Amino acid sequence: MKKDITIPEVKDVHVAVVQEQHKEYKTQDWNAYIINNSDNDLDTVLIVTRGYNDKKLTPVMRHTIAKLPARSYAKIEYLQEKVLELNNEFKITFFEGNQMFDKTYVFRKNTINEKALQTIPLMQLKGVLVK
């Protein structure tokens, strides 16, 4: 039965962590975003996140986005500074038409930092991208 299930490769959907100014507190915050750089809308986007290393494990967070239009992005969550010291995993499942897609994105520990900033597609902001 399992051999009959095929989940195609995910293309043009990325996760980025962007450093942004918090308007109210005037701080530089790290926020995770999902980016749909494809020509198709994504439906029922399910995102499961966690941070981990050999000794620590954060609680699992779950997020849902009903629809993510083509060539758009949506905020997933705020990342505290202490979490950047851990591996940060984003498991994303979504539907494109009637087809289900699934991919896990991992930011390795300490890779989210100001030295790694690059321009993020669609957003025109500086951040760290995992494809």
Image (tube, helix red, strand yellow):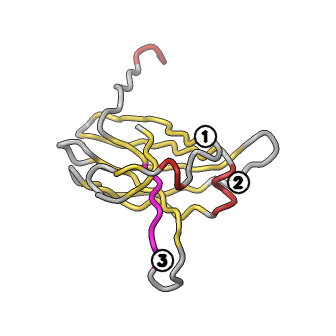
Q: Residue 28: give x, y in percent of width and height.
A: 52, 71
Asked if residue 109 is positioned above or below residue 3 in the image, the reply reads below
The residue positioned 42% from the left and 35% from the top of the image is 102
User: What span is in magenta?
Assistant: 16-22
Give the alpha-carbon distance from disc 1 to disc 3, as whole Å: 25 Å
Can you tell which quarter of the image residue 126 is in?
bottom left
Foreground: disc 1 or disc 2: 1
Give the alpha-carbon distance from disc 3 to disc 2, as whole Å: 23 Å
The residue positioned 62% from the left and 64% from the top of the image is 80
Which residue is tagged 2? 58
Q: Is residue 44 visible?
A: no
Is residue 63 covered in magenta? Answer: no
10 Å neighbourhood of mark 1: few (<14), some, or many (≥20)?
Answer: some
Which residue is tagged 1? 108
Q: Can residue 93 be seen in this view?
A: yes
Asked if residue 25 is positioned above or below residue 129 in the image, the reply reads below
Q: In the image as oriented, which residue stretches furthest toward the front?
A: 115
Query: Which sits in the foreground, 25 or 54?
Result: 25
Residue contact at pointers 3 and 2, CB within 8 angstroms: no
State left or right for residue 102 relative to residue 121. Answer: right
| Main secondary structure found in the magenta portion | strand
Question: Tag 3 or tag 1, which sits nearer the N-term?
Answer: 3
Secondary structure under tag 2 reads loop
What's the residue type where badge 3 is placed?
A: His
State left or right for residue 5 relative to residue 56. Answer: left
Which residue is tagged 3? 22
